[in-house]
Amino acid sequence: MKSIDLNADIGEADNPDWAESESQILTAISSANIACGGHAGDTASMRRTVHNARAEGVTIGAHPAYPDRVNFGRTSLVIGEDIDAKALIETLRAQILDLTEICAAEGAVLKYVKPHGALYNDAVSDDYKAKLICDVMARLEMNLILLGGPNSEMTKAAKAFDLRFVAEGFIDRRYTDDGHLISRKVKGAVIEDQDERLAQAQNLATTGRVQTASGNFLTLQTGSLCVHGDSAGAVETAKQARAVIEAAGFTIKAFA
């Protein structure tokens, strides 16, 4: 039977209802990208999320970001203007290590890294930032896997730094014709209709095909599918997407 990973960006909750939603998402996914202080999260939220993930048998990954909590890490920072390279390296290293220490305290192991938000989007096309992320991961010598965009600079950088790379597709986001995510600034960038989300999940899992915002179709080779934990209806999306994918003959299994 074929398998595919189902991941979610979590550990971002700042209120009880959102935190409960994240705990419910963990019952449906196989990998959790946990915010580690850059755009969201703190010691308490990391510990809670790691504990809950371990209890559900969910593989844990770090979700480091630009140090920009005000904008939730969704604003690009220009190296040399908004942040210098050394500071970015230091914050990414610190975020990953903070989560690593909490994992160890909870009897869990950090397996991979998925950049968050603007950092992720920048690393898709910016070879310098993609290499910077991979350099940080490689120097940690923890055998971490990079989860990122297919056919991107992250793909190339992971190979250059001898890191395993897993490409992901998004259940709840619209794509451009070149296979990348449309900016959240564009209306319709986030898929809100539940049926459309489920159709995209099924298509990505079974055929790798996705319909772009312009109506064209493209094929993405992915080993993991993502649902954003902060999207409206995320719990239902995660649970129903799992059911749809399993009904299509797939096993939901972590890539790490």
Image (cartoon, helix red, strand yellow):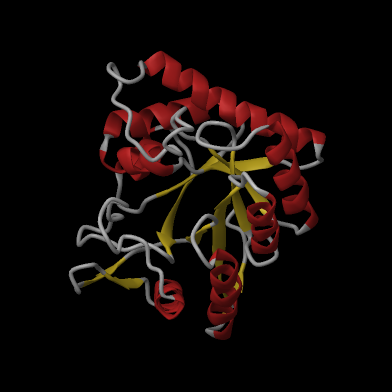
Q: Can see residue 139? A: no
Image quadrant where one finds the N terminus: bottom right
Q: Can see residue 131? A: yes
> Which is more toward the observer, 206 or 201?
201
The residue located at (28%, 55%) in the rendering is: 180
Left or right, residue 171 beside residue 238: left
> Which is more toward the observer, 127 or 9?
9
The residue located at (25%, 55%) in the rendering is: 186
Q: Is residue 135 above or below residue 174?
A: above
x and y, in percent, of residue 92 in the image:
50, 27
Q: Is residue 240 above or below residue 101?
A: below
x and y, in percent, of residue 55 in the image:
80, 55
The residue located at (35%, 15%) in the rendering is: 84
The residue located at (36%, 40%) in the rendering is: 118
Left or right, residue 83 beside residue 16: left
x and y, in percent, of residue 104 in the image:
77, 34
Q: How many marks?
A: 0
Q: Is residue 152 above or below residue 2?
A: above
Q: Which quadrant of the figure has residue 37?
A: top right
> Which is more toward the observer, 18 or 113?
18
Q: Is residue 83 above or below residue 127?
A: above
x and y, in percent, of residue 119 in the image:
38, 37
